[in-house]
Image (tube, rainbow, N blue to C red):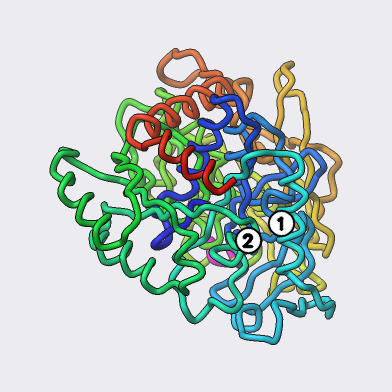
Amino acid sequence: MLAGTGSDVGKSILAAAFCRIFKQDGYNPAPFKAQNMALNSYATPEGLEIGRAQAVQAEAAGIPCHTDMNPLLLKPNSDHTSQVVLNGKPIGNKNAYDFWRKRDTTTRTTSCNEDIDFRKEVCDAFDRLATKYNPIVLEGAGSISEMNLRDTDLVNLPMARHADADVILVGDIDRGGVFASVYGSIALQTPEDRKLIKGIIINKFRGDMRLFDEGRKMLEDICGIPVLGVVPYFKDIYIEEEDSVSLEKKQRELAEGKVNVAVVLLRHISNFTDFDTLERDSRVNLFYTNNVADISRADIIILPGTKSTLDDLLELRRNGCAQAIQRAHREGRMVVGICGGYQMLGQTVSDPEGIEGTIASLPGLGLLPIHTTMTPEKTTRQVTFQFEGQACQGYEIHQGVSDTSEAILQKDHCIGTYIHGFLDNAAVIDYLLKDKRHDVPTMDYMAFKQQQYDKLADHVRQHVDIDKLYQILSNND
């Protein structure tokens, strides 16, 4: 298990690295995260929903993703409520306090009034996965030292106990205080759980590695646990990320000499990994903004997916972005809507049953001839489609239905689709960038991702004692 001293210390990326390393070394690994909280999700081959990070880790391991890799997914609707997705299917919304409050067991009641033992569900998922793959690379969530949540924790040390997993604690030196965070995280565990922590990895180091040689020894002395590696911060390896924390680091400005692609920054933006391929294209400057002047100057405008279509549509009208998009479209700019963004580009969006909240209906931006109605059923599936005569792939995850059977709707210079991964296809990118600047061949994104997994594995191998890790795992056996 890769457990953390806090959020965004690099657990997900390191889990992907070890999935790749074990695959390269001839094993049959699989990722597992008992409970994930994220708006970036993915559709499995069976048409079920899991966190995007576990889909990426499965890809690094060279295997199809499955709901057993992330049996419990919480998708925030607001600061206080989340949609609960269990074994790939939504089972209702839950208030955060009600979900995390102490009870006699981890059984909790969802909005569908059905008592569910979530601990049993996630443990059963792990057990099924462990019959098919070895080793399992578990990922924790947030910090392992949230003492107030210990009794209801499903994903960190309690899960490690069930899995009989060796825990490697990951600390982020870039944010400072790494000695206190690592030592404190270990010291605050129960004696039983403390024994599970077999190693430490210091992540995101910047500068001369030799400067931490003494610090490494000091950390081992005070913790009594070996430091398996100090992994330098990297900028030249590109792995899809799912946390909103990573979104905050994205480009926010226009650039000269590039095709400027403005992704409208929504409050409930989801699946922003849809734009990773465009972001890597050397012809493109892709940036996130809700500045109306920047939207007006962009060459291409993208309305992304959202967990709350009506709420974000209302905000677009309040902040002037809706009018800026309509004006840019009238002036001939290309506008693309994906999933919730597609719904917003239509004539109306209605929610008669209050699926998303209290807004019953709003007019859309009126760029596409569709009307959308929110429904309790959720569509999750992988899809193949034709675009410009080429076979393409993607996946759908959306609430609501629109009154058209077309997977992709085009009118004038506006494109709408429910398909996530739409922009990962070379045919789509070439179409969007045709007649624009810089005649550069479109990259093969699948080949590019495989190269990045190998680069990540090489980077981690170089800075982590893999032999020592295998020795720890062998001793556990």
Q: How far apart are labels 2 and 1 at the CA level? A: 7 Å
Vertical arrangement, residue 148 with respect to residue 315, above or below: below
Instruction: Check disc 2 and report the residue beneath it.
Output: 35
Give the amino acid type for the residue marked by disc 2 in the picture.
Answer: Gln
Q: For the residue marked with disc 1, what is the amino acid?
A: Pro
Of the pair 451 and 336, the residue shown nearer to us: 451
73 to 129, vertically: above or below: below
Q: Residue at x 66, y 50 (%)?
A: 345
User: Relative to 335, is 320 on the left or the right?
Assistant: left
Q: Is residue 434 found left or right of 74 in the rendered image? A: left
- Contact check, label 2 and label 1, Cβ < 8 Å: yes
Question: Residue 314 colored magenta?
Answer: yes
User: Is residue 347 depicted above or below 406 in this figure?
Assistant: below
User: Does the rendering let one see residue 292?
Assistant: no
Which range of residues does the magenta coloring cover? 312-316
Q: Secondary structure at mark 1?
A: loop
